[in-house]
Image (cartoon, rainbow, N blue to C red):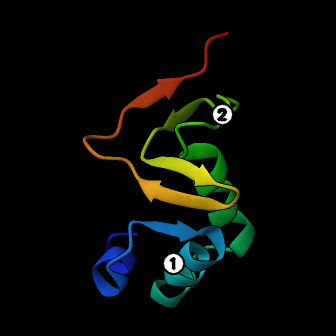
Amino acid sequence: MRRLRSRTGREAFRLVEIVREVQTTTSSYAESTIRTHVCSHMCRQAPVNAAVVYDDLDRVGRGVYRLKAGPAVARERSI
């Protein structure tokens, strides 16, 4: 997302743009893996369904994300 922000001057990006950006950089991850990581593991507003999630991104609209200002914080699932 930092590359997207640098190239476009925008702060928020659609999920499809993020997926495309990752796939132009590496072929190591399936589209579904990237989508899941962004929506479920990196988004502050996502429910804590995984063992560890991060609040790197803010969801600012349906399928639209923005990098959170400040350092990322890991949240652990409470059992």
Q: Earlier in the sequence, mark 1 or mark 2?
A: 1
Residue that label 1 marks:
22
- Which residue is painted at 65% across and 76% down in the image? 16
Residue occupying the far right of the picture: 32
Q: Is residue 24 above or below residue 2?
A: below
Q: Is residue 60 above or below residue 14?
A: above
Q: Quick one: label 1, few (<14), some, or many (20+) residues within 10 Å? A: some
Front position in the image: 3 or 23? 3
- Name the quadrant containing residue 38: bottom right
Q: Is residue 41 above or below residue 64?
A: above
Front position in the image: 73 or 17? 17
Q: Quick one: label 2, few (<14), some, or many (20+) residues within 10 Å? A: few
Residue that label 2 marks:
50
What percent of the width, then of the height, locates residue 47? 68, 31
Kind of residue at disc 1 = Val
Residue occupying the far top of the picture: 79
- Give SS at disc 1: helix
What percent of the width, then of the height, locates residue 1? 41, 69
What is the number of the mark on residue 49? none
Kind of residue at disc 2 = Ala
What percent of the width, then of the height, locates residue 18? 54, 73
- Name the quadrant containing residue 31: bottom right
